[in-house]
Image: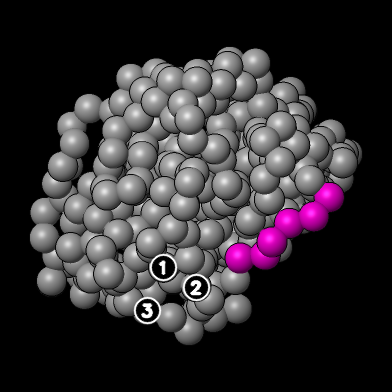
Amino acid sequence: MSMSRPATAEVAAAVAQTARPVTFPVTAPPEPGQCIEIAPGILWARLALPFRLNHVNIYLIEDGDGYAALDTGIADDQTKEAWLALLSGPLNGKRLTRLIVSHHHPDHIGLAGWLCERFGIPLLTSQTGFLACNNISLSPNALGADTYRAFYRSHGMNDTAAEMVATQGNYYLRMVTPLPLTFFRLVAGERLKIGARVFDILSGDGHAPEQIMLYDPSARLLLAADQVLARITPNVSVWAVEPDGDPLGLYTRSLGSMAASLPEDTFVLPGHELPFSGLHTRIAEILAHHEERCGTILEAVSEKPMTVADLVPVLFPRPLDPHQMSFAFSETHAHVNLLIHRENLAWTKDEDDVLRVVLATR
């Protein structure tokens, strides 16, 4: 399958030509239980996560006599207590008017059901986010099926590693409360009025399908969820349910579209880390990062055929715990599949049905 889109390096170079440096108007996040007014009528709070990426940002947008909330944190008692502390502290006397969820990952949608039920508010999200979350909630152990273990083994994992990667994410996937039975669908290209602001609804792919972002053109302000982060790259992974997918291709296309349609001085409110300006520069940096990783893979494969498992330590040479190994394998696979779609690499299979990649012949 050929790739009828510009190479990542070409897009990165084009974006970088008009870019300005990444800057941070606020250099420290809000303390637990506190908010920072990060833009007029928009409060920024931070919730803890029990992972290496130890926090998620949530935003509260002034909406009449209350606030519309964007994203929720995971479903655990600590996060519920953090929400109650916000509502009895800096938000005391204000109500939640509605809940907007950017995408289906548990750190963003985990408490959606609890918040909507407790405070009697509607859920607004993409159709994909709603259905994906419900699918995972109904069958959190599905990725441990024999078919998926076989997928990991076919890419060079031993039985122990395949078992670990196929099942270790189940605990994370369960960090979600049951969603409301109804929701309001957010669709890219439409608009959403919240208080005095009117947002263009955008969506991006790669990190999560149909991830919702909100852009206020009057203020050049973007609520970006996880699509663009200031210092780290969001996880972009191939999962066993879509083994031949090209999420990295989708992701780089989404970034290119954002760079083409949003101004370089856009103020970005991300799902993790600090809010920043310099969107085009950050997009160029992320695209260049992925292009460099593709080059590293091509160099390694030029010496000998390699499985995806062989390539993990090439891209991630440090020791990895089980949680990190799962993401590292899936991210490595995303780079391999991008190179397959570009026709830079091709699959070969040995007598044991183990897949390896080799340089493609043209």
* Residue 254 in view of the camera: no
The label number, if any, that marks residue 41 in the structure image: none
Residue at label 1? Answer: 198
* Residue 110 in view of the camera: yes
Q: Is residue 184 magenta?
A: yes
Label 3 neighbour load within 10 Å: few <14, some 14-19, many 20+ = few
Residue at label 2? Answer: 191
Residue 154 placement, left or right of 210: right
Give the distance between the C-alpha atoms of the residues marked 2 and 3, in whole angstroms: 30 Å
Position of residue 200 measured from the top left corner of the image (x, y, whole percent):
44, 71
Q: Is residue 154 magenta?
A: no
Residue at label 3? Answer: 6
Q: Nearer the viewer, residue 122 or 300?
A: 122
Q: Nearer the viewer, residue 243 or 344?
A: 243
Label 1 neighbour load within 10 Å: few <14, some 14-19, many 20+ = some
In the rendered image, the quadrant that contains the N terminus is: bottom right
Q: Which residues are magenta?
A: 181-186
Residue 104 placement, left or right of 219: right
Q: Nearer the viewer, residue 355 or 117?
A: 117
Label 3: which secondary element: loop
Label 2: which secondary element: strand
Disc 1 and disc 2 in contact, CB within 8 angstroms = yes
Residue 2 placement, left or right of 348: left
For discs 2 and 3, the disc positioned in front in the rendered view: 2
- Residue 102, above or below 362: above
The residue at the point 58 percent across, 16 percent down is 81
